[in-house]
Image (cartoon, rainbow, N blue to C red):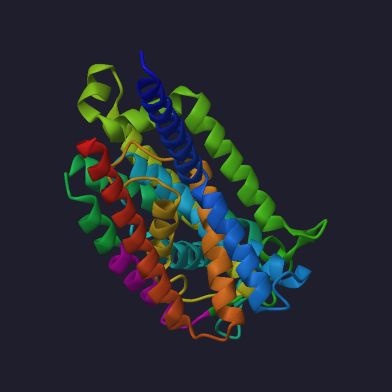
Amino acid sequence: MNLDSKNSISQLLSSVREITKENKFLDLIKKNIIVLILIFLLVLGTLTSGTFLSLYNLQNIAINVSIFGILAIGQTLVLLTKQIDLSVGANMAFSLIAAIKITQILMSQFGVNIIQEANYVNSGMLTIIVFTIVVSNLIGLLNGIITVKAKVPPLITTLGMLYALRGFAYVLSKGHPLYFTYLQGFNWLGTKILFNVPVCFLFYLVIGIVGILILKYTKIGTKIYATGGNEKAAIYSGINSDLWRIIVYGVSGFCAGFATLIYSSRLESVEVAQATGYEFISVAIVVIGGTTLEGGRGRLFGTFLAAIILGVVINIITLMGLIVWYQNIIIGIIIISAVFAYIKGIRVKKRT
């Protein structure tokens, strides 16, 4: 072998090593893109506002993230089974209003009126909390039953439920907001700070960690992924995919109920228009977190980080003094961009 041939081989090997290093670097970036985006946003927030890193502002971000994040956890499970739940925002309003109405009827049997001055709730806190979770969970299960058993497309089912729940909430409340100013202790979940961390964020951490562990290390997670990834194979392996779809809708309903308790306890009120558009925010978080709309692929850890990202984005917009419509524009752009990036990634894989 002459000297020219050896040099050519050496150059070729060097080029291969450089390409390999570059591919590894790109893979590293892709795997940690959410973390990198979060770091970038934290730096951006720090540079654009002197109050961004203040304890009070960070606590506000944590509270908002808790509400969005808990909703997104339920939405993630639904999307993993190749479904979607557009009723979660309306469920947040209806479940609490319905719980108050149920409690009012029950307590009236004992001569107790839990509402004074027409719209101030003053007692029955524990019963209201329990019925909020029960009602929201039942709404989720009903979504699942209609979708699975009646074979109605999930988009139609949950969109119809969105409008129906808003209407029922208006009828029950007669269009008036209900206040919890006189309901002692109700604001605890949305405002309590423990070791400088909002209690609701601690609940979000617990729910997120439990969800991650269940999806990753238990048969429940395997069945959920299999149901959305390859339903025929799941059925052949003995998995009741219909049952698991109903269950995850129930979990999504539970998450909506828990989220509204945080939201309403913070504002000390509930109204028909509460959480309008939150269903789309939850979908945006899930898509940003890497869960596909085709089912069977995604991680709750990605959802967990994506909720923080969106919370930081909204906070930066607020600190910059931009009106709420800019939030809607950015959320819309984020959804389209995330889906576009996913589709482009699929096409690249097919070509290679």
Say whether residue 21 is left or right of residue 197: left
In magenta, the rendered stretch is: 162-177
- Quarter of the C terminus within the rendering: top left
| Residue 214 appears in view | yes
- Quarter occupied by the N terminus: top left
- Residue 137 seen in the current view: no
Foreground residue among 202 and 310: 310
Quadrant in the rendering for residue 333: bottom left
Q: Looking at the picture, tell me which residue is in the foreground, 344 or 74.
A: 344
Nearer to me, 26 or 341: 26
Q: Look at 45% across and 50% down and name the residue there.
A: 289
Residue 260, image x and y in percent?
53, 63
Please check the rendered image and state whether residue 277 is part of the magenta-colored stretch, yes or no.
no
117 sits left or right of 153 in the view: right
Left or right placement of residue 253 versus residue 127 in this view: left
Quadrant position of residue 85: bottom left
Q: Is residue 114 depicted above or below 137 in this figure?
A: below
Residue 147 image offset from top left, x and y in percent = 23, 46
Which SS does the magenta portion mostly show?
helix
The location of residue 59, given as percent across then percent down, is: 71, 66
The single residue placed furthest to the top in the displayed view is 1
In-front residue for pair 60/271: 60
**Quarter of image, res 7:** top left
Q: In the displayed image of the protein, which residue is found farthest to the left?
A: 151
Q: Is residue 189 left or right of residue 300?
A: right
**Residue 33 at x, y percent in the picture:** 50, 49
Q: Count how many numbered circles sit on residues in the image.
A: 0
Residue visible at 38% across and 29% down? 12
